[in-house]
């Protein structure tokens, strides 16, 4: 861990935000070695429904087989490697077929048809390459590691702690996608502190006290905490007025807080008294990140004739764009030769913990692959 002379934690050297080789190693360590959030079960409600997940340079097919189980495969035909799917979402007509030579697979990935192959060819030897999949309360997670541990090991106590929100029952109402010219770690760091809120987020500070709430002790798979409302506000929206019923199952205390958690490597989970917001981060390059932001509500609310969500979406779209803009400015500043690591305050412990996790996984990755230490200067 980087420290200053007086022992305070320091920000990471600039190369962790600008070096393409470090970025590649992070993709291996975080996105190919950990469970990452690919989407929601509601995206594939029926057998044959699918969506593509682009992660760490890989295209992955996520679908549901005839038994209802979720399956995930590399988007690569076993014949000559052609990508099978082009459309981001769609529906398989009971089978998965390569558009090149017609190799055909069942929804469980097994090869069922291989035209013109000679006698002795064994279809069982050429199923689609599988990716491990698991579901937590409606969130679909994937893991590309051949030795993937159970998802529960990464999530720790989150399933129990967040069970009252009944996330599996919630349905997406809106999605906005952003393309941010900043390193993915800057997005996570920005999400996990609100010292910038009085300067950057006037709307947010009207309805929530940026100095309130508590942070959970950092865990290997996540960091996060809660914030409280102010001035009679009941939810995070343009005016703080709650125009929807509370989510069923929440206690009186849970109704008074918003819970913000970064679940490594790419899920920013924001649990509100009356809705759920999620951000999924998709790093594209060392200085570019795509972000999908979604708002999920209870089906009973969505069915109401007077249902409204614009107050919530406008609020967070404004706040998001403020965050993305300052993250891009951070990327530009860190890219300068003048940048040097600076000290964290005692209220930035989650950021320091995230940096420590980055360094731990980098060290573990180097030990596993036998890579040499990078030595590209201190900035």
Image: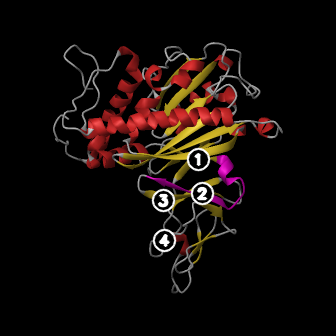
Is residue 173 one of those drawn in magenta?
A: no
SS class, disc 1: strand
Q: Is residue 64 above or below residue 281?
A: below
Residue at image point 47% right, 72% down: 82
| Camera sees residue 50 | yes
- Determine whether label 1 and label 2 are within 8 Å by CB: yes
- Determine whether label 2 and label 4 are within 8 Å by CB: no
SS class, disc 4: loop
Residue 78: image tag: 4
* Real-space CA distance between mark 1 and mark 3, rounded to the nearest whole angstrom: 14 Å
The span picked out in magenta is 41-55
Which of marks 3 and 1 precedes in the sequence? 1
> Residue 298 at what x, y percent from top left?
74, 36
- 124 or 14, nearer to the observer: 14
Reading the image, the residue beneath label 3 is 59
> Few, some or many C-alpha atoms within 10 Å of disc 4 (few <14, some 14-19, many ≥20)?
many
Which of marks 1 and 4 precedes in the sequence? 1
Reading the image, the residue beneath label 2 is 51
Which mark is in front, 2 or 4? 2
Q: Quadrant of the N terminus?
A: top left
> Few, some or many C-alpha atoms within 10 Å of disc 1 (few <14, some 14-19, many ≥20)?
many
* Real-space CA distance between mark 1 and mark 2, rounded to the nearest whole angstrom: 9 Å
> Residue 303 at what x, y percent from top left?
81, 40
- 318 or 149, nearer to the observer: 318
Reading the image, the residue beneath label 1 is 39
Q: Quadrant location of residue 44? A: bottom right
> Few, some or many C-alpha atoms within 10 Å of disc 3 (few <14, some 14-19, many ≥20)?
some
């Amino acid at each position: 861990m980087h420290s200053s002379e007086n022992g305070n934690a320091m920000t990471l050297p600039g190369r962790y935000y600008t070096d393409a080789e470090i970025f590649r190693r992070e993709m291996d360590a975080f996105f190919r070695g950990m469970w990452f959030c690919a989407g929601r079960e509601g995206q594939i409600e029926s057998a044959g429904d699918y969506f593509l997940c682009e992660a760490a340079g890989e295209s992955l097919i996520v679908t549901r087989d005839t038994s209802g189980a979720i399956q995930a495969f590399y988007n690569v035909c076993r014949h000559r490697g052609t990508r099978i799917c082009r459309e981001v979402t769609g529906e398989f007509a009971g089978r998965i077929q390569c558009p090149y030579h017609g190799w055909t697979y069942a929804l469980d990935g097994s090869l069922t048809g291989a035209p013109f192959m000679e006698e002795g060819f064994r279809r069982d030897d050429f199923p689609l390459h599988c990716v491990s999949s698991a579901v937590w309360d409606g969130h679909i997670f994937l893991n590309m590691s051949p030795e993937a541990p159970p998802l529960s090991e990464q999530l720790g106590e989150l399933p129990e702690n967040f069970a009252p929100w009944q996330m599996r029952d919630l349905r997406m109402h809106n999605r906005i996608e952003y393309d941010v010219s900043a390193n993915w770690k800057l997005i996570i760091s920005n999400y996990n502190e609100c010292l910038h809120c009085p300067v950057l987020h006037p709307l947010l500070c009207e309805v929530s006290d940026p100095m309130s709430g508590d942070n959970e002790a950092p865990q290997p798979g996540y960091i996060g905490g809660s914030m409280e409302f102010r001035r009679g506000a009941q939810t995070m929206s343009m005016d703080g007025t709650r125009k929807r019923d509370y989510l069923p199952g929440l206690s009186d205390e849970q109704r008074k807080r918003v819970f913000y958690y970064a679940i490594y490597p790419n899920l920013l989970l924001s649990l509100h008294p009356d809705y759920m917001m999620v951000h999924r981060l998709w790093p594209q390059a060392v200085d570019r990140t795509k972000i999908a932001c979604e708002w999920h509500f209870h089906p009973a609310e969505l069915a109401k004739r007077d249902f409204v969500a614009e107050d919530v979406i406008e609020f967070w779209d404004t706040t998001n764009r403020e965050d993305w803009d300052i993250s891009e400015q951070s990327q530009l500043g860190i890219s300068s030769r003048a940048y040097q690591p600076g000290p964290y305050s005692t209220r930035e412990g989650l950021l320091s913990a995230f940096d420590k996790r980055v360094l731990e996984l980098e060290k573990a990755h180097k030990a596993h692959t036998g890579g040499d230490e990078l030595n590209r200067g201190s900035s």
